[in-house]
Image: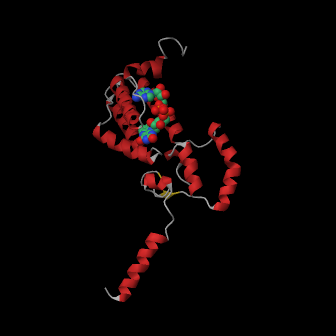
Amino acid sequence: MSSFLTDIFHSLFSLSSSSLPPKTLLQQSHNEDYEYGIGSGLKHERPCRACNDFKTWIKTNRNQQSKQQQQKTDNNNNSELIDKIRSDCPLDKDELGRNTWSLLHTMSVYYPEKPTTDEQELMKNFIKGLARFYPCETCAKDFQTEIHNDPPQTETRHSLSMWWCRQHNRVNKKLGKQQFDCTKLEQRWLDGWSDGSCD
Ligand SMILES: Cc1cc2nc3c(=O)[nH]c(=O)nc-3n(C[C@H](O)[C@H](O)[C@H](O)COP(=O)(O)OP(=O)(O)OC[C@H]3O[C@@H](n4cnc5c(N)ncnc54)[C@H](O)[C@@H]3O)c2cc1C
């Protein structure tokens, strides 16, 4: 290699290794620079709140702030924690998950017992859209793989609600959480517990 080419190579190499800012926790876990929505190309200045639980989100935000801003953050720390107990702040990953599961399970126990072909098709498209647009990117990618391996069962109310129960249990397992007993699905999401505690 001529010295001219060697110089260019070195300047390019040193640019790529030393000029880039260090990756934040969020970037390391998502490999995307604050991209919101899979393939959306939308970049934001702050990390994706819906992709992280609240603690990680706060930690990641702190990592990317300058020392001057750090002091300001510490002063604002209390108000950030107050955000957590407010109900009108953007959702973190867990809040988004809980709210979404509530909708999905409730929807499935109210789904027609014998849906028409059109209704089945609409439900499949809804699930496909959810997997495409779910705001937590890693969750969405994982969900896309799952619906490829275990396609939605929209033939009856029972098959759909059991399919969602299975999907949710799969995520529970991944996160080290307890498995839900799918025979209790209707008590949890439709009728209330048989001991009458929801009445
Ligand atoms: C499609 C989807 C994919 C997700 N993927 C990820 C992921 O990859 N990584 C990640 O960190 N988070 C993911 N989440 C979020 C995660 O599943 C939880 O919602 C979040 O961690 C909050 O958990 P939680 O313990 O509060 O209760 P949740 O798991 O949200 O459950 C809410 C309630 O649902 C009931 N329930 C639990 N399991 C079942 C079941 N199998 N069937 C019926 N009802 C049930 C229980 O009563 C529980 O209290 C995903 C959410 C969705 C909707």
Placement of the C terminus among the 4 image quadrants: top right
In the figure, 163 relative to 137: above or below? above
Which residue is located at x 38 percent, y 38 percent? Answer: 174
Residue 131 x, y percent position in the rendering: 40, 43
Closer to the camera in the image, 18 or 37? 18
In the figure, 16 relative to 65: above or below? below
Quadrant hosting residue 118: top left
Residue 20 x, y percent position in the rendering: 49, 68
- Is 195 left or right of 170, judged from the image as shown? right
Q: Which residue extends farthest left?
A: 149
Quadrant hosting residue 129: top left
Which residue is located at x 40 percent, y 25 percent? Answer: 180
In the figure, 156 relative to 17: above or below? above
Placement of the N terminus among the 4 image quadrants: bottom left
Colouring:
secondary structure
Q: Which residue extends farthest right?
A: 75
- Is 5 left or right of 21, judged from the image as shown? left
Which residue is located at x 44 percent, y 31 percent? Answer: 104
The answer to whether any part of residue 13 appears in the image is yes
Closer to the camera in the image, 57 or 131? 57
The answer to whether any part of residue 107 appears in the image is no
Which residue is located at x 69 percent, y 55 percent? Answer: 72
In the figure, 27 relative to 145: above or below? below
Residue 93 x, y percent position in the rendering: 51, 42
